[in-house]
Every structure is written in C-alpha cells, then in structure tokens.
Image (cartoon, grey):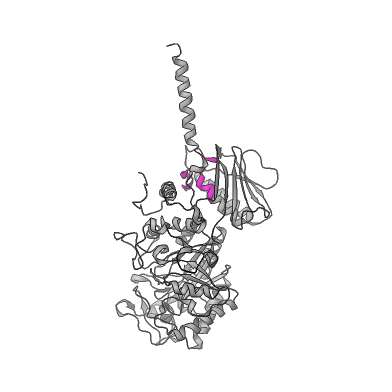
C-alpha cells in the first residue's frame, strides 16, 4: 500500500507521456495532398507562438509578398501578428523562408526542414516557396483554416524533413464561366482552393454559345449583348478588363497562371448575336432562343443579320464565317486585347465541336487563329480537334475525347494536356443519383477520378509528350459557388495528386485515408463537398 502514491504518479506519468505523444504523431502520418515525394519524421514537434518571427533570406521582391501571404494565413485563426525580419540572423523559433537558386529541388520544388526550434522552408524559386507553404499549412491543426480567431488550440506541427517537387509542370483546372457566369469573388475563391493543392493553371472558358464574358473594347456589343444572359435565361454577366486584370493578379500572387479561352470557330453564338456580320443567317435552336432587345440593353441601331441569344445546352449549331475577312479582324482584335492583359504564355482558342464548320474551312481557320495568337507573343492551346490543322511549333492540344486527335497532335511534335472526359471532367456526375452535372462521358466516382494514369490513356503518348493535367468544370448545370464546390470536391484533389506525384508513389488507400483529414478542413472552410461512400469521413 505504501507504494500506492508512487505507482499512481508513475501511471499518471505514463499516461501523460503517451497522451502528449498522441498529440505529435510522426510527420509521416500527416495527411498531405498531394503526397510529397519524401517525408522523414523525427517524432517531435514545433510550436508556433505569438512571437514566432518570419525570417526572409534571398533577393526577390516577391519574397515579401509570399511572407505576407503566410502571415495572413496564420493570423486568421491564431490572431498572431507574426513579424517579418530580413536583417539579423533568425532567432529561436523562427520560420525561415529561404530563396536559394543553387538548391537542386527542381523549378517548383521545395525543402521543408522542421525542428523543435525552427521551420526552414527553402526553394530555388518563389513558386517552390509558395508550394512549400501549402504543405506547411496542411501540417497544422485543421483549425488553421478557420477565418476567425480560434482559442484553445496548440499550433503544433511535427518535426522532420520534406523534399518535394511536381511530376508535371502544368497542373490545371478549367472553369466555364460562359454557360453560367461566376463572379470575380467566386473565381478568387476557386483560385484559393486550387492553390491549397499546388495547382498552377486556371483556364477560364470565357465565351460560348450562351455567353460572352470578357470586355473587348473594340467590339463592345460582345458583352452588352452577348454577356446579357446564360443557360436557363438568367442575367449572365461579364468581367470588365479591370476585373479580369484583378483576377490575373490575384492568381499570380498564388502562383497560378490564368489561361483565357475564346472558343472558335464553333461555340460562338453569343458573338453572332452581338455582331451579325460575323455570320449572317445562323439559326438558333428554337426552344431556347431569346430575341435580342437592343433598346433594353442600351445598344443603338439595328442588326438584322444578328442571330438570337441562346439559353439551352445543346451545342454545335454555330460557327464564325471562316471565309470573311471581318472574322479575322474580329479574331485579331479579341486576341490582341486579351494578350495585352494576360501575362501568362497561353491563349486558348477552343476549336472543339465545330459541327457546322466544314473541315475544309475549319483547318485554315485554326491555322490563322494560331498565327494571330503568335503575332501577339502567345502560344495557342486548343481542344484536341485542332490537331486536324497544322500546329505551329509550341502549340498545345488538350485531349478530352478523341485519342486519334491527341496522337495526331503529338505526331506533329505538339505537347498534350490530359483532360480525358471520362476521368477528369468535374461536371460528370459521381453516380446515377447525383443531381447536378451530366453523364455523357461517364459517371466518375472518386476512385475513378484517382485511379488513372495520364501516360496510359493514348497509345503512343508518353510522359515526354504530356505537358500536364487539367480538370475542366463545365457549368451547364452548375449555377453557384456551392454547386461548384460539390462537383469539384473531393475529385480535384485526385487530379492534383495525379499531376504532382510520380505514378509509382500514387496510392489509393493512402489517399483515401488522407482525405478524411481534408474533409475536416473543408468543413471548417465551409466547403460543400461530396461525401463519397468510398471514404470513411467519420462523423
Ligand atoms: C463537351 S469538352 C464540350 C463542352 C461541354 C461539355 C460538357 C468540350 C471541348 N466540349 O462544350 O460543356 O462537353 O461536359
């Protein structure tokens, strides 16, 4: 009995150490998506506190901006106002962001070295530092994602070393803002979510039969008329050039390149309703045609040649007049204005489903469109059909449907972006009970979105032919942010992992387990996601 107090305290001590152990599991047990190339845990933890400093090393104006991003990220939930220091040696407990061009971690890679005393994030590029911050973010308790002050959480992260770099240079998503318009705020929200998963390209589908969404100053009716509606007949909308530039800058700060798409020569009814001279005599499917009320839209004069507006979802009835010079003046003006406000290297010229353009007209049109893009210093991307034309050196084909087209592009020396509709289309329904979305290509459950290999999609197309992966979200049935999130999550994380991780390291069971933690983060971020029955989300 005498030994009771001793035993009691010994037991307490054991309990206490095992509990605190539980609070700092090994770094290898953390749920990072995409899975880093190498994670070596050292079993301890670093605790972020109020006076932790951010220490910057390196010569780049962007460092300050990256540091401000991290500072803000931390401040939301912790309310710590971390100070940034560029002068003295980092003190105890600092977060060091080091830009070191001699570091061999690849162009977008990074190394994260966390000890009990400090966090050191190094990279050879600013982008690498930014992606490293996303990993760091995922090592913190999920509550870090709450946008307002959280109390009672210890901001601890596990110690260890992560070395990481992406498999593909192009890791993208596409948002169709033409079928349903999405506000600047919605697009920025999507950009934030893509950044969390180290995606670096956002392709905006800015025009289609149902709407024209980007202000073109030399052709103002494109937006006043062409932007005035959307699928289902809502009021549509468009981005002014200032708003577009704002989106581009916001994306740039998150190391995401905006790729604007003007779809042509098909998918152009919104332009034809705005300027009849671009193709007199198009007939819009009757049940979803809307008369243009020019007076109500404040457009003077008449345009007897113009088509009606279109609010349905069946496509393939429209085409620019490929044999008229005015068409090329139009394309030139549009590409010139777009190129002027797009710092990224690419302009997407569409080229898909031009069912009413004869091949003998389609080919010279695509050839000329590519030349116009090149004239303004940009590189063309087009849907896989553009491989029928003569691809300019550097032009990129986006495989979505026809393997032979993708192969034809590669045979011409082009690189390919992999967006197979049966795997990567985020508008495809999860299963037959999904209310939103379509299923013309497939039902895409989470395992199907994860378990595919870009280099095994098309015979004769291997790693060196593939620029990267892109997941498009077409929005015929998607009308708002919450619906967007439901179709995107969790599948976008599967796409992000395919794009980042080498195929040997992809692991469905590990991914499924890691998603549970991400589900918790999404709850805290207020994201509406599909609770796939294949994942044990917990309560
Ligand atoms: C096909 S994908 C299209 C789009 C539709 C999509 C719906 C592609 C290049 N064309 O116009 O929105 O299917 O899933």
As drawn, 238 above or below 532: below
Name the quadrant of the N terminus.
top left
| Outermost residue, top side | 2
Task: Please tell me whether residue 139 belongs to the stretch shown in magenta.
Answer: yes
As drawn, 301 above or below 395: below
As drawn, 2 above or below 420: above
In the picture, residue 344 is in which quadrant?
bottom right
* Picture quadrant of ligand 1: bottom left
- The range drawn in magenta is 134-158
The answer to whether residue 537 of the structure is visible from this angle is: yes
Name the quadrant of the C terminus.
top left
Kindly identify the residue that appears in the image at 39 percent across and 66 percent down.
475
* Rendering coords of residue 289 (x, y %): 33, 78
* Rendering coords of residue 429 (x, y %): 34, 62
Q: Is 224 left, or right, of 82 in this rendering? A: left
* Rendering coords of residue 100 (x, y %): 67, 52
Q: Is 187 left, or right, of 132 in this rendering? A: left
């Amino acid at each position: 009995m005498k030994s009771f107090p001793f035993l009691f305290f010994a037991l307490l001590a054991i309990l206490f150490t095992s509990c605190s152990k539980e609070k700092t599991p090994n770094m290898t047990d953390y749920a990072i998506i995409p899975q880093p190339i190498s994670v070596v845990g050292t079993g301890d933890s670093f605790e972020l506190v109020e006076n932790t400093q951010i220490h910057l090393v390196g010569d780049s104006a962007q460092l300050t901006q990256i540091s401000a991003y991290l500072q803000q990220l931390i401040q939301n939930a912790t309310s710590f106002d971390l100070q940034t220091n560029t002068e003295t040696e980092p003190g105890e407990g600092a977060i060091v962001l080091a830009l070191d061009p001699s570091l061999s971690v690849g162009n977008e890679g990074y190394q994260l070295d966390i000890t009990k005393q400090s966090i050191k994030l190094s990279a050879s590029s600013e982008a690498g530092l930014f992606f490293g911050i996303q990993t760091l973010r995922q090592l913190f308790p999920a509550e870090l994602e709450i946008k307002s002050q959280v109390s009672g959480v210890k901001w601890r992260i596990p110690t260890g070393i992560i070395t990481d770099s992406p498999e593909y240079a192009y890791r993208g998503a596409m948002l169709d803002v033409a079928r349903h318009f999405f506000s600047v705020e919605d697009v920025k929200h999507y950009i934030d979510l893509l950044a969390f998963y180290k995606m670096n390209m956002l392709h905006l589908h800015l025009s289609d039969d149902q709407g024209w969404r980007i202000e073109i100053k030399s052709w103002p009716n494109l937006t006043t008329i062409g932007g005035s509606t959307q699928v289902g007949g809502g009021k549509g909308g468009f981005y002014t050039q200032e708003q577009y530039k704002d989106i581009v800058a916001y994306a740039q700060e998150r190391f995401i390149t905006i790729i604007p798409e003007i779809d042509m020569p098909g998918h152009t009814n919104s332009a034809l309703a705005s300027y009849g001279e671009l193709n007199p005599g198009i007939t819009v499917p009757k049940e979803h045609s809307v008369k243009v009320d020019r007076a109500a839209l404040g457009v003077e004069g008449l345009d007897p040649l113009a088509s009606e507006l279109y609010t349905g979802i069946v496509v393939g009835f429209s085409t620019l007049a490929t044999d008229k010079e005015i068409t090329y003046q139009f394309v030139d003006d549009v590409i010139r204005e777009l190129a002027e406000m797009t710092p990224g290297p690419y302009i997407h010229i569409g080229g898909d489903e031009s069912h009413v353009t004869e091949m003998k007209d389609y080919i010279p049109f695509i050839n000329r469109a590519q030349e116009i893009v090149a004239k303004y210093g940009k590189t063309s991307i087009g849907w896989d059909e553009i491989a029928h034309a003569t691809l300019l050196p550097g032009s990129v084909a986006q495989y979505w449907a026809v393997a032979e087209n993708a192969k034809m592009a590669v045979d011409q020396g082009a690189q390919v972006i992999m967006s197979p509709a049966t795997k990567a289309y985020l508008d495809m329904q999860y299963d037959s009970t999904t209310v939103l979305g379509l299923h013309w290509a497939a039902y895409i459950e989470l395992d199907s979105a994860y378990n595919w290999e870009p280099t095994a999609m098309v015979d004769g197309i291997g790693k060196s032919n593939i620029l990267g992966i892109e997941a498009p979200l077409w929005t015929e049935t998607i009308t708002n942010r919450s619906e967007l999130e439901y179709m995107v999550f969790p599948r976008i994380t599967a796409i992000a992992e395919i794009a980042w991780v080498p195929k040997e390291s992809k692991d469905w069971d590990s991914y499924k387990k890691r998603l549970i933690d991400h589900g918790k983060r999404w709850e805290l971020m207020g994201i509406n996601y599909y609770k796939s029955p294949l994942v044990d989300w917990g309560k």
